[in-house]
Amino acid sequence: MVLATALLSSCKGDYDDWAAPQGYDAEEAQNVSLSATAGAAIDMNNVSGETINLFSTSYEAPEGFSVVGYEVEIGATEDDVDVFPSDANGSIAATDLVSLTESYFGKAPVERTLKAASVIYLSKDGEAFYAHSNFVDVKVTLVTPDISENYYLVGDFCGWNEEGMMKFDHSDINIYDDPVFTIKFETTAANQYWQIIPQKNIDKGNMWEKPGVVGVAVDGDTSMSGFLVTDNPQSGKIEEPGKYILTIDMMAGTYTLSKQPLELYLTGSNYGWGDTSKGGIWLPMTPCYGSDEDFWTIIYLHEGEKFKFAPQAGWRDDFGGQATVNDVAGVGITSDSDNNLVAGKAGWYLLYIHNGSERTFTVLQPNVYLIGDTAGEWNVADSHKFTVPTTEDGVFESPAFAKDAELRMCVSIDGFDWWKTEFIVFDGVITYRGRGGDQDRVNVSAGQKAYLNFAKGTAEIK
């Protein structure tokens, strides 16, 4: 590469002859040659040192030049590079190469191709220069973590054999970029022991091969989170019966157990099938107070509308036609070959789901009630029902409030007291009790009414 030096000049202090021709002696061009030659492919499984050589370089410069520093430019393309400190041999820190490769391509142990060039910084007679080599290919394969394609939970609550083992869920992303696996399960007895079996053991026909089996370091460990081991793995223990989610990160070698209430969401043909990247929606169902398995919502169904339910805002463990259907309201619910539920008649409905070991889907009339002092009594009665609109954007209208009092409203579902399915209005928004505690109170006046727009989740008191 030809390095051009700066042309320095000065002018007269009296500025008398600006128009006169000016001339300067041209400085001699400085010829510096720097080239890079691709090295061998790099497999990080075989790298043990702190630095790694990317390529070899050849450098020539006229007498008087001295090299004062080295860098490497490296990236996915020649136009998108990061710069790292280097040495004369084109070496950089191995950790930098790994981090850079992961940032462009992820963690999968597949051969990747990066573009790299050498940069040297030079000095001559007090002036600074730099030279840049050609780009060469650097082929890198990241370390292959010991992660199986699948994992299975075994234990007292499901069995210690292949027939009873339960498979962990995983995303569609490769296991190296997403090494997290989850599973939901239930224990009905106290002090239940568990371990984890990798797919590779199943493939070898030896379920209990060690190393391979995954467990905890201390037998009977009741911790809800900690580290996993494959060296002499022991069984963890779940002390209390209940429903749990076990999450394992096989890159970090950690686990987390959580006992928590389950959720339920609805999506379908009128909600973009939950594709949030395209504006799709997952509608949260309201849990019945005191239950992890019972949910409800008031919703407008369209003729021919298809829908399903899932325990999270995403496609996993989803269900529809698999549930037992109780069409009390006479909407004409059917299911198709994909187990989508299909509405037969348009209108407003109260949907009630029991998502337990057996699933039931019940369609009820969308009856909403005043209750308490504003209704004049603390019973669910037809005289306290709201009117039901006939259009999707319509409003549910309450009877006039009987007296100045705190507003209480609910739906009615067999098996649940009214306060387990109640809701209220705060600042113009319908707010559901769900699994929460007793809600704050809103005072209203006799003769006023409540107007509820369930499609928008809004309300007015006037």
Image (cartoon, grey):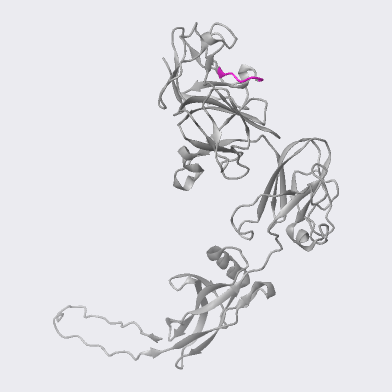
Query: Does 413 lie within the magenta span?
Result: yes
Tell me if residue 402 comes above or below residue 99 in the rendering: above
Q: Is residue 17 visible?
A: yes
Task: Residue 282: tell me if it is visible.
Answer: no
Main SS type for the magenta part?
loop
| Residue 315 in the image, given as x and y percentages of width and height | 58, 45
Q: Residue at x 75, y 49 (%)?
A: 226
Position of residue 361 in the picture relative to residue 67 (left or right) = right
How many numbered marks does the figure carry? 0
Q: Is 162 displayed left or right of 72 in the figure?
A: right
**Figure check: 207 above or below 122:** above
Q: Please state the horizontal and vertical placement of residue 132, each as a whole percent of the image.
A: 45, 81
The residue at the point 75 percent across, 43 percent down is 224
Of 14 and 6, nearer the camera is 6
Quick one: 78 or 377, which is closer to the camera? 377
Where is residue 417? Give x, y as percent: 64, 17
Can you name the residue that lies furthest to the bottom here?
A: 63
- Which quadrant of the figure contains the C terminus? top left
Q: Residue at x 57, y 76 (%)?
A: 139
In the image, 74 versus 199, the foreground residue is 199
Asked whether, in this view, residue 361 is left or right of residue 189, the answer is: left
Q: Return the x and y of residue 393 as percentages of the image width and height.
A: 40, 26
4 lies above or below 280? below
Asked which quadrant contains residue 400, the reply is top left
Looking at the figure, which quarter contains the N terminus? bottom left
Q: Which residues are magenta?
A: 410-415
**Quadrant of residue 293 within the rendered picture:** top right
Residue 61, magenta (yes or no): no
